[in-house]
Every structure is written in structure tokens, then in C-alpha cells.
Amino acid sequence: MVLSEDLSLSVLIPARNEMFLSHTVQDVLGHIKGNTNIIVVLDGAPADPPLPDDPRVQVLELPNSIGQRAAVNEAARHSQAKYVMKLDAHCSVSMGFDVKMMADMQPLWTMTPLMRNLHAFDWVCPDGHRRYQGKSGPCEVCGKETTMDILWIPKTSPKTTSMRFDNNLKFQYWTEYKKRQKGDLVDTMSLVGACWLLERERFWDLEICDEKHGSWGQMGTEVACKTWLSGGRLVCNKKAWFAHLFRTAGGDFGFPYPLSGGDVERARQYSKELWLKDTWPKAIHPLSWLIEKFAPVPDWDIKKRTKGILYYTCNTHDKRIELAIREQLYKVKGDCELGCVSLQPTEFGDWNITLLLQRSPLSMHKQILAGLEKMNADVVFLVESDVLYHPSHFEFTPPRDDIFYFNTNVWKARFSDGHAVWTDDLQQVSGMCASRELLLAFYRRRVAEIERDGFNRHYEPSLRTGISETQNWQSEYPNVDIRHDRTLSVSKWAPSEFRSQQYARGWKETDGDLPGWGNVVELVKAIRRENQDG
């Protein structure tokens, strides 16, 4: 039995009266390429036929059945691997499925391979007439008795990569969405419960197999919702596949657990309580966020919110910086509405407004307000003329309309030499995103208050002030805030420069590579070289 400390993957197979269990285990053993073991839970019934005798196979025999979800949990408790993969007891897998999937895995991901159908057997009579897998019985041609001929052939079609659930939380295939999937690693809204892989620690953290559902039912919806709504990503990996034998009518290959319609409905009602009512305590997104992410979704009448980018500039920064930021915004805007509010005529964006004002904090707030009043989008990102925004910044969608969201994944890079620094939880207006209506209400009030009382630098939507509810988030790759001699706020290049050390938490600095950007010194140097005559 493989129990080394560097064990990479445990394949968890819950089984009760599964006639193809031995074939499944033998198939997995024949296609393992990494440091992978198999943990089989015989849930109240022995294996018939017996399982292969192999050191990579660990068998847990339970005298009494505890149910499929509980059996998966029992297998996971005996794993020492970094990853666990739940697999039904009637499946085939592709060669090297384990190393291919783990090579592409990222933190917070759950992964399923491409799904095929498994042609496991035919019924064959003495005269050679064949009948595709299904209920046993005499030959439909000659009437003679038939015997099962094991074939174990993964069918080449269909190749399922896209699944969803409907507004009753029932699993559905989603062929239409495949047209939106590009590449080998593709998002899927949901999955079947037959095969999925994630980090073992995350399996327990998310309580993936919540036994309050009961033994069976809603597993695909549970895995999908817990992955997406916790801030993770559910990915189908086309580089690997599994083939699943779908159960047919009759007693030859029926469901091995006693199961009634009431059991299925109880699982669905518990699932509805979690997801339709948004009561799962570990969610950072509501279910509406997931539906909106994949919109339009059949059966779900949720409109996908439009996004806008509001660029505002005082037109006093180094022109090389401003032109680089605008060029980057054009590259990453996608379907976002892009508006520009400036203090000098500026031909930029889908539309632009010029306010004939002098540079000041009040002017900046008036610019933002004017842009919000012009903007048509439902959700607005506030962007400044000296911050390089990564495309992943604009992939975020605010889960709620009553909260200000700050992207705190930002490095500050010195324009003179490219040296970059980082601190934790840095909230900046240049990283803010929220509902347009929420922003409008705030900036109307804010402009009036500045006009009446003067500018207070710390009076912004912020965790520090408690004025409005806020949440932090981090894009997959950082933004780069170019710090120069015309920035309104003071740049700090060492922890000792902070009056309060809480704002220097997590301090990092580099002259090397930033994820998604390459070498930061070269990045800034390229901006300094460009447009020197402009």
C-alpha cells in the first residue's frame, strides 16, 4: 500500500454491491502515471469479484453501510495525499489522468476531466446476437438465453465538457455553452458527481461531502456551488478523460443503495436551503453571482450586469505614463463601456467629458461624479491615469450592490527606476469597483460635503472609517501603480516611513518579475522610453 509522505493523489471509490468495481480498480491501476493510490470503501458489502492485489490499493471494509457521501469522507480521512479524486465504481480513466490533471491544478480549483460514456458490456446469445448494455433477458432475435460480455470500451462520443443545474437545482447537460469554451482548461457551471479532483485540505475546508444531504443526490450541485461561491473555479480539463457507465433500467445494474423519491427530494430541499436562500456560511458570492457569470443560463431569469470603466485624469502627469495606461485600457476593456473625464480635452474612450477645473481633490470627485452620471453600465470600475490594470482586474463582478469592493492586489512601482513595493490590504480608490447606483449616491453626497466642509483625505469608502461597508478582493494578477512626482498621495518606500505600522503589514519589495507583467524594472523602463516626443 502506497503511504509515502510525498503521495500526490488518492482516488476515492465508494462502493456498495458494485458489480464493476474490480474492473474500475484494475482500469485505474493500469492508467496511473504518478505517485497515486486508490482507496476503496466497501460500504457494508464485500467486493464481488475480488479486488486486484496491489500495494497501491487500500481497502476499507465497513460491516454496515454508512451511505455514499459518508463513504467518500471515510476514504478521504485515510488519505495522506495532496489531492483527492472521487470516482464512481463503474468508470474508466485515460492514461496518465493523474499527472495531467495535477500538472494544471491551481489553488482554489476543483477539476473534472472530460466525460465520455463507457460501453461496459453487451448481452450475447449462443448464436452471436448482441444487445447493447441494459436489462438482462433472452435474445430479442432468437429468444435464446444471453450472457454478459465485458467490453469496457470508452466511447468517443459524446465528449462532455459543459454542465449546469436548472432553477430546481437539477443536473442538466449544457451543449450550447460548449460554443463559449476555448482551450484545454474550460470553466463549467456544474458537473456530474462521478469524478472530481481538488486539494485534500480544501475538500475538508469546504465540507464537500456534507452528509446532511443524505447518502446520495445533489453531489454535482454541491461540489459546483461550494467551489464557485467560495471564490474558487470549477474547471474541465480536456487533456484527461473519464468514461462513466450510466445505470440502466432493471435489476442487473441498478442503484446499489436503497433509495426512494423522498430521499432524492430531501437532498434537493437541503440543497435549495443552502443555495437558493444563500445560507452557506463559507460563501463569498451569492448564487446569483454564479448565474450571472455564466449568463444567459437556461431556466434562470437573471440579467447579466454590464460593466463600465471610468477613467479620470487631471492631465498633469507625465504624458508617457498616461499614454501607456490608455493603451493598456484599450487592450483590456473587452465589452466594458469605457468613459473618460478629464480637465483638458482628451480624445479617449467610448465617450469623453472635459471639466474646465483646476486640479484638486474636489475636482477629482466632481470628475468621478460627472462620469458616473454619464455612464450606462450597471457596475463601474474607477481607474486612474497612472495605474496599469491587468485584464484579470475587470473579470471581477460585485456579488452585492450595497458594498464597495477594493482590489488589493497592487504593486507600487517607482517611475524613476521601476523598484516596486507591496503591502497587505491596501485600499485605493483606483482599485474600487461597485454598483453604479451605490457609487452615484456616495459621490453626490461626497461632493456636497467637500464643498461645505473641505476635503478630508480619509473620508472615502474604507474599512478604516466605517462609513460604508466594504470588502477586499484580489485579481488573479496584480495591478501596477506607477508612482511619480505628481501623485496626490505620498509614496513610501520603506516600512519605517509609515506612521502606523499596521499599514506596512506584509511588506514586500522587488526589482524582479511581477506575475502577469514580467520584470517590473523593464516594464517601467519601457514606459519611460515610449512617446518621449509626445
Image (cartoon, rainbow, N blue to C red):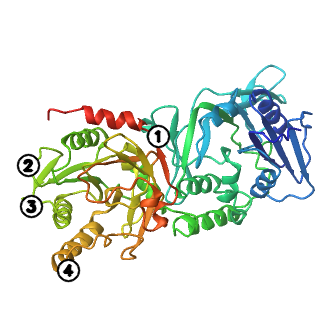
Q: Residue 357 got which mark?
A: 3
Q: SS for tag 3? A: loop
Please name whichever residue, 73 or 173, is drawn nearer the observer in this view of the structure: 73
Q: Disc 1 versus disc 3: distance between alpha carbons?
A: 38 Å
Please name whichever residue, 450 or 255, is drawn nearer the observer in this view of the structure: 450
Name the image quarter holding the N terminus: top right
Q: Disc 4 versus disc 1: distance between alpha carbons?
A: 42 Å
- Look at mark 4 in the image and give the residue it sits on: 453
Percent coordinates x, y for residue 509 in the rendering: 47, 47
Q: In the figure, residue 520 lies in which quadrant? A: top left
Name the image quarter holding the C terminus: top left
- Look at mark 1 in the image and give the residue it sits on: 515
Q: Disc 3 versus disc 2: distance between alpha carbons?
A: 12 Å
Q: Residues within 10 Å of mark 4 (few under 14, many from 20)?
A: few
Percent coordinates x, y for residue 201 in the rendering: 69, 53
Q: Nearer the viewer, mark 2 or mark 4?
A: 4
Which badge, 2 or 4, comes first in the chain's sequence? 2
The single residue placed furthest to the bottom in the displayed view is 452
Q: Give, as a three-letter code, the residue at label 4.
A: Asp
Q: Residues within 10 Å of mark 1 (few under 14, many from 20)?
A: few
Q: Give, as a three-letter code, the residue at label 2.
A: Pro
Q: Disc 2 versus disc 4: distance between alpha carbons?
A: 30 Å
Q: Residue at x 68, y 41 (%)?
A: 246
Q: Give, as a three-letter code, the residue at label 3.
A: Leu
Q: Residue at x 19, y 72 (%)?
A: 447
Q: SS for tag 4? A: helix
Please name whichever residue, 10 or 169, is drawn nearer the observer in this view of the structure: 10
- Look at mark 2 in the image and give the residue it sits on: 345
Q: SS for tag 1? A: loop
Which badge, 1 or 2, comes first in the chain's sequence? 2
Does the image show residue 115?
A: yes
Q: Disc 1 versus disc 2: distance between alpha carbons?
A: 35 Å
